[in-house]
Amino acid sequence: MARRFRTKGDALVVTLEPTELELLRQLPPQLGTLLTEASDESGAKDPVVQRLFPRAYLDPTEEAAEVEWQALVHSDLVKERLAALELVTATLEHATERRGRFEVALTADETQAWLGVLNDARLALGIRLDVTEETDLEAVALDAPEASAYAIYGWLTYFQGELVEALLR
């Protein structure tokens, strides 16, 4: 396979297989629903929402400070994440086909949005699957009910790592 990441001027060009492009296109609407729920009280007890928006004050005696902190910043954090989802969606809409693969050129801001969305997707899926550092993704049986979800989690982890490595070059 051709190199997945290359630079072209100031842009980082990402090469994706058709199935990878389709997977990435599904992330923003799914995460958007989760983030929208996080902006109201119904999502407050969801472990995924708690992981995406961790407490600022872990000391239980600081509950008033935590409530004040959440009132000050939570809606802005949700808006920032929703904006990143919109940016990822826009970049994926501009993917161009080349030799059976798709290329997406990313600016620095778009790359940061991709990193954030990939991280949020991994965190959300990891919480739903109860992934820990001890989880052996390769030991998941292919016929297990959640095998495809574990495969997606593994791919998101791998892809995010590749993207970070490309940025460090």
Image: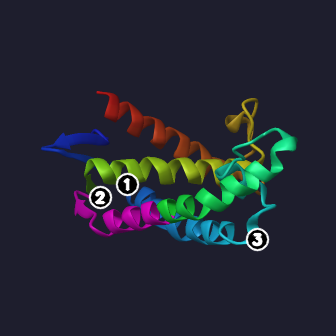
Residue 121 place in picture, x, y as percent: 58, 54
Which circle, 3 or 1, is nearer the viewer? 3
Name the quadrant of the N terminus. top left
- Residue at (69, 44) in percent of width and height: 56
Residue kind at label 2, given as amino acid type: Phe
Determine whether label 2 and label 1 are within 8 Å by CB: yes
Q: Residues within 10 Å of mark 1 (few under 14, many from 20)?
A: some
Which residue is denoted by mark 3 in the rendering?
A: 41
Residue 128 visible in the picture: no
Q: Of residues 108 and 79, which is closer to you in this image?
A: 79
- Residue at (35, 64) in percent of width and height: 92
Compared across the picture, whether 162 is left or right of 45 comes to: left
Range of the magenta residues? 82-101
Earlier residue among tags 2 and 3: 3
Judge whether 85 appears above or below 112 on screen. Answer: below
Residue kind at label 1, given as amino acid type: Glu
Residue kind at label 3, given as amino acid type: Glu
Which residue is denoted by mark 2 in the rendering?
A: 102
Determine whether label 2 and label 3 are within 8 Å by CB: no
Q: Of residues 128 and 56, which is closer to you in this image?
A: 56
